[in-house]
Image (cartoon, helix red, strand yellow):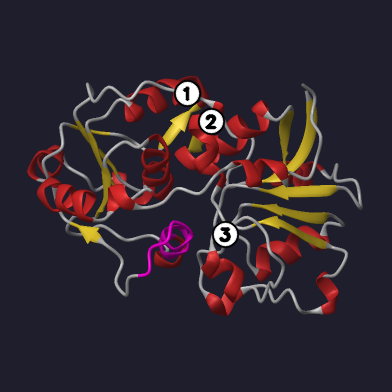
Amino acid sequence: MKSILTWYWLGGSYVLNFGEHFTELILAKLGFVPRSFDQEVQAKTIVRGEPCLLIVGSEFHKHNVERIMDAGCQVHVWGTGNGRGAHTAIDMREPKYKGRVFVHALRGPLTKRNSHFEEDVPLLDPGFLMPRLYPLPTTGEEGVLYFPHHSNTVIVLPATVERIGAKSLVRAMICKADIQATMARVAAAEFVLANAMHAFIFCLAYRVPCAICLTEGETFNMPDKWRDVLESLGWSGDRLPLTKNLDEGRRWWESEGQHLKIPDTQPLLDVFPFKGDP
């Protein structure tokens, strides 16, 4: 397979966040192996003018984009979003980005608005490609799972998992050897309560019943990234639909969640900017 320079959080590490694994897994199906931007910068092996791809993540903002540009790279955005708010957003109307930053797809409408990007591109997180690329059985046999953001995992006690109605906890930081088994486990859940966003996206994509759940003392990471994803699915509420337990989660799923419209993923594949090895 071809290699391609890619920015993703902790890129190249053996242990990755659940969503960052999607970057490697999706690229593998498209004929590529990612080379970590941060590791290449540290090794001083960046080739000036080469493309750097942004796929899964919330870091399509001025600081990160200009850091990649300063390394001499072109920036190619394919489904990334900005979860850090309008005040951090890149303004695509600025001349300095012309011919340096190429937007092929964005995570959602909020990222597009905040970036002042006017062209018509697919608005969908690449995580929604996972069932198409990695079909998995959805049996419900794993019961109810709680899948918190990695920053919340350290404060979740077994009693909390039981109190909210879950059977067991899924940890977001996963080694490469375990990612396929973790995906299979989540796909086979009866219901997933999550505040790890790509766990939520994964469940929506595989049509596993799910809800956003935040327990007492936990931090809700980057609300804008959640709003961006939900808007891409046709949601238009004023308040993000946070729940506290399984009963509330089931009610949300029945009234709203199961009715969210998952867009066709083919347009996202159609605009992937590079040709990999079969």
Residue carrying label 3: 81
Task: Write down the quadrant of residue 2 in the picture.
Answer: top right
Alpha carbon separation for disc pair 1 and 2: 6 Å
Residue 251 placement (x, y as % from top left): 15, 52
Alpha carbon separation for disc pair 2 and 3: 21 Å
Q: Nearer the viewer, residue 88 or 10?
A: 88
Q: Tag 2, which secondary structure?
A: helix
Q: Amino acid at mark 1?
A: Pro
Alpha carbon separation for disc pair 1 and 3: 25 Å
Residue 92 sits inside the magenta stretch: no
Residue 101 placement (x, y as % from top left): 79, 62
Q: Residue at x 46, y 26 (%)?
A: 179
For the N terminus, which image quadrant? top right
Q: Residue at x 84, y 78 (%)?
A: 95
Q: Nearer the viewer, mark 2 or mark 3?
A: 2
Mark 1 and mark 2 residues within 8 Å of each other at the beta carbon: yes
**Label 2: few (<14), some or many (≥20) within 10 Å?**
few
Mark 2 and mark 3 residues within 8 Å of each other at the beta carbon: no
Residue carrying label 1: 135
Residue 254 placement (x, y as % from top left): 19, 49
Residue carrying label 2: 132
Region rendered in magenta: 226-236
**Label 3: few (<14), some or many (≥20) within 10 Å?**
many
Q: Amino acid at mark 2?
A: Arg
Q: Nearer the viewer, residue 17 or 245?
A: 245
Tell me which numbered mark, 2 or 3, is placed earlier along the sequence: 3
Q: Tag 3, which secondary structure?
A: loop
Residue 37 placement (x, y as % from top left): 73, 46
